[in-house]
Structure formats: structure tokens, C-alpha cells
Amino acid sequence: MIRPASVDPDMRFHKARVDSIGSSRTSRMYSSLVSQVKHCMAQIQGLHLVLPQRSIRERHRLLALIEAGDGVAVSNFLDEHLSRPRECLVAAVGGVPGPEAFRD
């Protein structure tokens, strides 16, 4: 399995965001999905489907939205943040990507 060095720091970022909610139930649910999330992120990063600079910009944007307290904007942004690389991965493994793969 591809394991770029950036996967673990990225996973810590996401875990910290989930844990900051303060819900042990949500943290447990996230923890149960982590192995699958790590696998997908390693594939995405190993295939260079998302540039590191883009990931950094998106983390800053996510934190700004959280700090602003705009839950709807956070939810919309997370949907976009996750759907683009997901669909790029679909294309990379020979599937038919959704339109999210082509959004900038």
C-alpha cells in the first residue's frame, strides 16, 4: 500500500477537527472509519491526485469557516473537499468519475 509521509499528519488534522466537536460518539464513529480513510488518502496522495498546496489551502479555508461558526458553509465545503479527490480516485482506478472530479 502507498503510504506517503503526508497521510499521518493529514489524519491528525482530521481527527483533531472531529474530536474538537466534543462528542465521544462522533469520535468513536470516526475512529471506526479511520483505516478506510487512511487507505483512500494514501491512494489519492500517492497518485498525486491532489497537490499538497491545495490541501494546505483547503485546511486553512476549513478552519476559517469553523472559526466563523458557519455550519452550513463548513458542511458544503467538506462535501466539496471530499468529493473532488474521491471522484479523481474513481477515474484513476478505471471508473467513471462524477462531475466533482473536474471542479477547480
Image: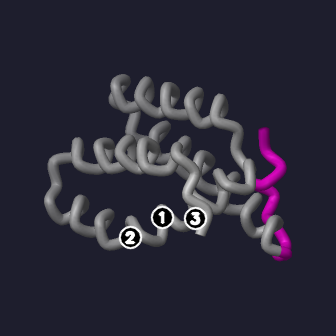
User: Residue 90 location, x and y as percent?
Assistant: 75, 69
Q: How dense is the environment of label 2, judged by Cα within 10 Å: few (below 14), some, or many (20 and up)?
A: few
Q: Secondary structure at mark 1?
A: helix
Q: Whole-Å distance between the Cαs marked 2 and 1?
A: 6 Å
User: Residue 23 location, x and y as percent?
Assistant: 16, 55
Seen at 59% across and 27% down, the residue is 57
Main secondary structure type of the part rendered in magenta: loop
The residue type indicated by label 2 comes to: Leu
Q: Secondary structure at mark 3?
A: helix
Image disc number at residue 37: 1
Q: Secondary structure at mark 2?
A: helix
Q: Is residue 80 above or below residue 70?
A: below
Relative horizontal placement of residue 100, taking residue 75 as reference (left or right): right
What residue is pinned by disc 2? 33
Q: Which residues are magenta?
A: 94-104
The residue type indicated by label 3 comes to: Cys
Q: Earlier in the sequence, mark 3 or mark 2?
A: 2
Q: Is residue 98 magenta?
A: yes
What residue is pinned by disc 3? 40
The residue type indicated by label 1 comes to: Val
Q: Are marks 2 and 1 in contact (CB under 8 Å)?
A: yes
